[in-house]
């Protein structure tokens, strides 16, 4: 079993296209609850069904690395905004997690002691960038994006997008938090800074943000809640094939 030392979070990720062994996929199917299996069957396209299956296996296999619980034995409950949390079994460390998936990449961030959010995006997916920023980001972010040369806007858009999603997910409220009520400043010497509208009642010093490009085509961001004066939180990243790799 793996320990999660104080001041550390673990970020697990899987490339779903690398998981094709039929025996492994059959084992993933066995892990799902009846509700999860029904949800999986509702996806129209095989890619969607595969990603959902690997996501369920990822969270269950990863949690079992930290507690003497079989991957199939975890049960989950969602908060009123849809965030899943562990509902059982009891008597295990109070693990928390957050999940994100996009075409080609699935991530699961695990913690014991704080609110966390993770977001991954495929930056090659079709769609607008500055138009979306104008509609949904804060005016300062949209203006900063527009001020960049056109060839840098797409990459920067996904920096903002993943960070903003990671924050609203760490708050557990998803899009119930308006995306224009907070602003990321990305070009400051001290690193990534957030500023909040008063209506959000949040403190910029209570958060640490991280941004990565795990592959050429993917962007990944994490939002980690921290106490005032706490040293920087260490993020340990681990690639995994659920149930195959042992830790
Ligand atoms: C649901 C939401 C929290 C994240 O959605 P997303 O970025 O599309 O999807 P992700 O893969 O990053 O995250 C989905 C996972 O987050 C978790 N999640 C769901 N609701 C959550 C919440 N309120 N808080 C934290 N995590 C949540 C779940 O584990 C979910 O996966 P699951 O249902 O398979 O368990 C929310 O921010 C959302 O709906 N975003 C959509 C963004 C979008 O499409 N915007 C377009 C308009 S510009």
Image: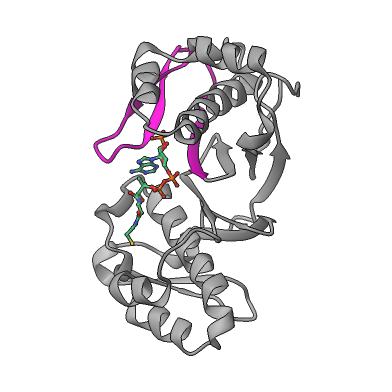
Which image quadrant: the C terminus? Answer: top right
Residue 168 appears in the rendering: yes
Residue positioned 53% across, 46% down in the render: 103
Q: Is residue 57 above or below residue 79?
A: above
Residue 226 appears in the rendering: no
Residue 92, magenta (yes or no) = yes
Q: Is residue 92 above or below residue 124?
A: above
Left or right: residue 153 compared with residue 22 = left
Question: Residue 18: x and y, percent?
Answer: 69, 33
Residue positioned 66% across, 25% down in the render: 20
Question: Residue 171: x and y, percent?
Answer: 37, 49
Q: Is residue 2 above or below residue 125?
A: above
Residue positioned 72% across, 20% down in the render: 244
Question: Residue 97: x and y, percent?
Answer: 50, 35
| Magenta residue span | 74-102
Question: Residue 34: x and y, percent?
Answer: 36, 12
Residue 8, magenta (yes or no) = no
């Amino acid at each position: 079993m793996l320990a999660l030392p104080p001041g550390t979070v673990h970020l697990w990720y899987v490339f779903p296209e690398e998981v094709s062994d039929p025996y492994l996929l059959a084992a993933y199917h066995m892990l799902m609850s009846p509700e999860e299996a029904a949800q999986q069957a509702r996806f129209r396209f095989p890619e969607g069904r595969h990603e959902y299956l690997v996501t369920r296996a990822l969270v269950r296999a990863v949690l079992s690395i930290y507690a003497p619980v079989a991957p199939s034995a975890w049960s989950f409950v969602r908060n009123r905004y849809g965030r899943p949390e562990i509902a059982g079994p009891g008597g295990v460390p109070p693990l928390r997690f957050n999940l994100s998936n996009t075409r080609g990449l699935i991530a699961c961030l695990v913690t014991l002691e704080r609110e966390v959010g993770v977001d991954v995006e495929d930056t090659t997916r079709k769609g607008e960038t500055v138009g979306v920023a104008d509609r949904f980001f804060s005016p300062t972010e949209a203006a900063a994006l527009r001020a960049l040369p056109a060839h840098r806007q797409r990459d920067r858009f996904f920096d903002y997008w993943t960070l903003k999603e990671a924050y609203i997910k760490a708050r557990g409220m998803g899009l119930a938090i308006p995306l224009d009520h907070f602003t990321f400043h990305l070009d400051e010497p001290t690193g990534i800074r957030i500023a909040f509208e008063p209506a959000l009642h949040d403190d910029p010093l209570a958060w640490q943000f991280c941004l990565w490009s795990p592959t050429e085509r993917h962007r990944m961001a994490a939002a980690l809640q921290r106490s005032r004066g706490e040293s920087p939180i260490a993020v340990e990243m681990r690639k995994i094939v659920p149930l195959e790799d042992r830790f």
